[in-house]
Image (tube, rainbow, N blue to C red):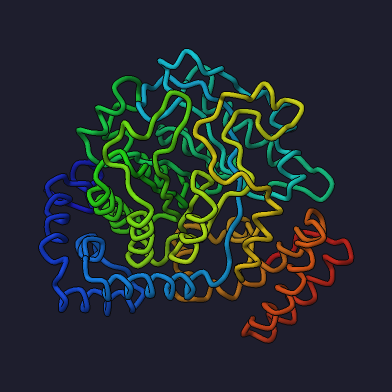
Amino acid sequence: MYDPKSPHAEAFIDHTEVLESVAYGTAHREDTALIRQILEKAKLRKGLTHREASVLLACTLPDANEAIDALAREIKNAFYGKRIVMFAPLYLSNYCVNGCAYCPYHTQNKTIPRRKLTQEEIIAEVIALQDMGHKRLALEAGEDPVNNPIEYITESMRTIYSIRHKNGAIRRANVNIAATTVENYQKLHEAGIGTYILFQETYHKESYEALHPTGPKHNYAYHTESMDRAMQGGIDDVGLGVLFGLERYRYEFAALLMHAEHLETAFGVGPHTISVPRVKPADGIDPARFKDAISDDIFAKLIACIRVAVPYTGMIISTRESQNMRARALQLGVSQISGASRTTVGGYNETAAHEAAHTEQFNVSDNRTLDEVVRWLMEFGFIPSFCTACYREGRTGDRFMQLLKSGQIQNCCQPNALITLQEYLCDYASPPTQTIGKRLIAAELEQIPNEKMRHFTRAQLKKILGGQRDFRV
């Protein structure tokens, strides 16, 4: 029985409710009156239910689909403006005891070299990332209680936060590790975690268990209920995601929104982010094996419908996707992207790059440098943002969501985006990127509606040009 308040996975992700929602979408995919009604509700920017959103995803009416895309762009602009938050993944270890069928780190893979970074190697990786200009990382590690215990993750976080190199510093470390206990989530919270990220992979229980035949990840309920335990452990910013291509996309879409509804109902705050990865080639992994792979057009519609359904949630797309697909996704709802990513253990430090070879979790499709990505974003009119202010000012969880939903967060985000972009331009950018950035900042500074905040931002920008760093609203 479907119950969004329940702490039990098979109640808040009820299989029958998911199937009925998919069927409801199919039945009403050409219901002009209902689709118009749902779109009118979506224009209020309060979100949609999983059933309402399922109708939009199933919709086959060309005019209505154009309206969905237009509304997604409108909502994205209303909540996030032109800002695109930048980050990079940092792979700490590829030791893993699970048997995941879609990941080259699975324990049966005897060809991939296994590596775990020492704290000294982490320092070298972080310095390399700081030399690019990164301020925000997503830490990645396989599940292995012997090689990757929680103490290793928290020690690595403390190491990362301690490194000061030239004008560089990592100001936010998000963590993507396997489902764990409330006690371990408390340890991550105490170590200064940003957002806890965990992809469900698939919400279809039977498929989930088949794709995870061995290891602790086989336990569907324990994995699916992980965000509840993270919240109970004090982590109020959590990030959801599914790996599209493992199961029917409309099933995953409805279940993903049901998970978001559960968090909102049970804890008063929905997911901070939703990631939208697709199955990609990797060592021994052929996406063609998975019959539910989706086209670029379907992928774009998924992004638009997620943006319309959960307008307050940040959306992430990685370098799994090509430059062209990322450009399309940015228009429809994505608000965070990675840049110059390495999905290898030790892949950023050039002196150790040969050791990192063949340890990729997936093949990167967008291989541009961070400078190239930043310049590309600005050429599109976006503002690359290296901001971490909300986390550092305690604007997390329900406090962040209240500010976002009310629109008040704009008073912080636009100034902070410009301030951190100015830091990047001064310390890391190439001359062509500096030229474009200077023009962009001058134009966007005048778009800050509050005169007092505009004056404050202008003053901080001058201080950065004078050599000072790390200002935030």
Q: Quadrant location of residue 271?
A: bottom left
Question: Which corner quadrant holds the C terminus?
Answer: bottom right
The reply to whether residue 473 is in sight is: no
329 left or right of 170 in image: left
Residue 210 visible to the viewer: yes
All told, the count of numbered labels is: 0
Figure check: 106 above or below 158: above
Question: Residue 142: horizontal and vertical position, in percent?
Answer: 48, 27
User: How far across and down, in percent of the image, does residue 365 sit?
Assistant: 53, 43
**In the image, what residue occupies the spot 42% across and 22% down?**
106
- Examine the image and state in which quarter residue 437 appears: bottom right
Q: Position of residue 90 (x, y in %)?
A: 60, 37
Q: Residue at x 31, y 74 (%)?
A: 42
Please provide percent x and percent y for residue 29.
16, 66
Give the residue at the far right of this rendering.
466
In the displayed structure, does residue 254 sit left or right of residue 182?
A: left
162 on left or right of 267: right
Q: Nearer the viewer, residue 75 or 245?
A: 245
- Residue toward you, 46 or 299: 299
**Residue 420, relative to residue 127: is it above or below?**
below
Q: Determine whether 173 is above or below 358 in the image.
A: below
Viewer-nearest residue: 383 or 473: 383
Asked if residue 110 lies left or right of residue 457, the reply is left
Instruction: State the residue at coordinates (35%, 57%).
Output: 297
